[in-house]
Image (tube, rainbow, N blue to C red):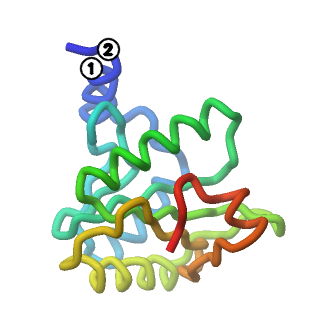
Amino acid sequence: MEHRLQTALTNCFAPTHIGPNETHFAGLLDDLGVRYRQQTVIGHYNVDFTLEELPVVIEVVSGGGDANSRAIKFERSKLVLNSGWHLFELRLTSDKGCRPLTLDGAEKIIADANTLGSTPPATGKYRVFRGDGRRVSLRGANRERWAAIGAL
């Protein structure tokens, strides 16, 4: 078995790579009664969340990362999108600092997921949200700074 796939499977069954923001978001989803999985294996990558009843992946991002991290994010995003999933990026940082995760924000994100759940994902497109559930417009400088592929 390929080493990267073996590592992804290990992380799925013994989830040691779940950070505090992911734990908090999981609690909000629990409060909303949303069924989800953490550290789901897609290809040889683990994604933060998948919704059990919808083809939606939610990645919680709290930093920009180095060039290697951005390259991995780009490849993972392409794989997720090409595998038939909608990809939501929950962006917790911006020029103005950290954006807290809120219950209202989680409700808005899940409402968007429910709206999109019955439609196929747009090729090469994903959605970016702040912790309060507002969509982030990725135009101009924001597109270059935040987009891995190209956001809707």
Q: What residue is rendered at 33% in x and 65% in y?
A: 86
Please rate how many residues cluster around mark 1, counting C-alpha atoms within 10 Å: few if below 14, some from 14 to 19, many from 20. Answer: few
x%, y% of residue 57?
Answer: 34, 59
Residue at 33 percent of width and 50 percent of height: 80
Q: Amino acid at mark 2?
A: His
Q: Left of 133 or right of it: where is 117?
A: left
Q: Which quadrant would residue 27 be assigned to in this image?
A: bottom left
Query: Where is residue 19 shown, x and y percent of the image?
Result: 52, 45
Which residue in the rendered view is the most extreme toward the front? 123
Q: Secondary structure at mark 2?
A: helix
> Closer to the camera, 20 or 140?
140
Kindly identify which numbered label has been placed on residue 125: none
Badge 2 crowding class, 10 Å Cα cut-off, few under 14, some 14 to 19, many 20 or more, is few
- Amino acid on which the number 1 mark rests in the picture: Gln
Circle 1 sits in a helix, a strand or a loop, which is it?
A: helix
**Residue 70: x %, y % from top left:** 61, 40
Task: Looking at the picture, tell me which residue is in the foreground, 6 or 25.
Answer: 6
Judge by depth and name the residue closer to the eye, 139 or 67. Answer: 139
Q: How far, Cα to Cα, is label 1 from label 2?
A: 5 Å
Residue 56 position by quadrant: bottom left
Q: Which mark is residue 3?
A: 2
At which x and y percent is residue 125?
Answer: 44, 65
For this orientation, the residue located farthest to the right is 96
Q: Is residue 7 above or below residue 108?
A: above
The answer to whether residue 99 is above or below residue 38 is below
User: Seen in the image, is 86 located left or right of residue 59?
Assistant: left
Point out the image quarter for the N terminus: top left
Which residue does the numbered mark 1 point to in the structure image?
6
Question: Is 71 located above or below residue 37 in the figure?
Answer: above
Quadrant hosting residue 144: bottom right
Question: Residue at left 21%, top 69%?
Answer: 54
Q: Is mark 1 in CB contact (under 8 Å) with mark 2?
A: yes
